[in-house]
Amino acid sequence: MDNFTSESTFFLMGFSTVPELQILHALVFSGMYLAALLGNLLIITLTTQDPRLQTPMYFFLKNLSCLDLCLISITVPKSITNSLLNSNTISFFGCVSQVFFLLLFDTTEVSLLTVMSYDRYVAICHPLRYKILMSHQACVQMAASSWVSGGLNAILHTAATFSVPMCGALDIHQFFCDIPQLLSLSCSYNIGEIAVILLSLVFDLGCGVLIVISYVHIFIAVLNMPSKEGRAKAFSTCLPHLMVVTLFLSSGIFAYLRPLPKSPSIFDLVVSVFYTVVPPTVNPLIYSLRNKDMKMALRRLKISAVL
């Protein structure tokens, strides 16, 4: 058993050590990070300044954009810096911080996506009760509950993951401190973290079931609408959210349920990119391209900037 202490250093072995490929990786990640920053900051600006977007749906969308900004900032800047400096190290406390904040924002986002599906369900299936059920106080409580669930999950995972000493070379075959990779370094079977992972899986599946139930009711209600314009408007607000949920949950659950291969593979890197980097980058595009209200708000912002 090696002497594993808080002074230990982890080695992120995710991407190539070839200088040309490191530069390519830094350029690609820099482009995605810049796109995520601009897209999510634009949504935050529009939903904050435009008076017509002061509704529960856009309140939650603003929260989602804030989460996406935080989520991508946990892993990508460090990975870009390592590539540019030809370094692959991360300190013990840096690794602990990555695990904690990644799980905080991941779990909060799952909870928030569930709340957003409930918001769409109430808006379409119970429009007359919408203002009562989705009052500002209720929205704040739902958003706060999402953050609390994320915080509790992050504390449990972080404490359990680093409660067991780690042996051998502290090589993590990812571009960030990933829990499955950290578990493979444990000197003994980490029963505590396995139990926490199972609890998290139950939580994620529970959220997934609630989202599916909400959308079953939504689609039934939409298909029964007599107005073609009403159906089109309902689908334009629901389909983007459903696409985001599917991308985020499917890639994340697959990454944690898939057994670690005996040797590192590019496939594992691609999967991790899909649940840590891709959602924050494409979410603004998904929500803005199919949303007429967002397009109109962007036009009004451009006009006010010119004047």
Image: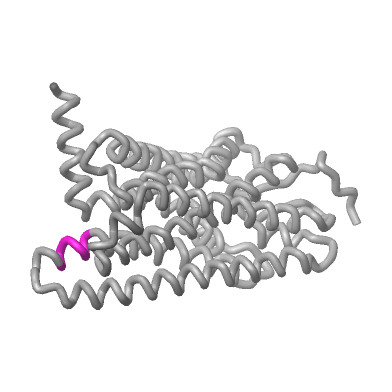
Q: From the viewer's perspective, tell me whether residue 37 is left or right of residue 256.
A: left
Which quadrant of the figure has residue 226? bottom left
- As displayed, is residue 265 above or below residue 19? below
Going 21% across and 52% down the picture, which residue do you hit? 291
Query: Taken as a whole, is the magenta stretch helix, strand or loop?
Result: helix
Q: Can residue 102 be seen here?
A: yes
Classify the position of the N terminus by image quarter.
bottom right
Looking at the image, which is closer to me, 267 or 258? 258
The stretch of residues the image draws in magenta is: 231-236
Q: Position of residue 130 (x, y in %)?
A: 29, 59
Looking at the image, which is closer to me, 96 or 149? 149
Going 37% across and 47% down the picture, which residue do you hit? 136
Q: Position of residue 209 (x, y in %)?
A: 45, 74
Q: Position of residue 188 (x, y in %)?
A: 84, 65
Q: Can residue 20 be seen here?
A: no
Residue 235 highlighted magenta (yes or no): yes
Q: From the viewer's perspective, tell me whether residue 118 is left or right of residue 201.
A: left
Count of numbered circles in the view: 0
Going 58% across and 39% down the picture, which residue do you hit? 78
Residue 48 highlighted magenta (yes or no): no
Q: From the viewer's perspective, tell me whether residue 304 is left or right of residue 274.
A: left
Q: Position of residue 165 (x, y in %)?
A: 84, 55
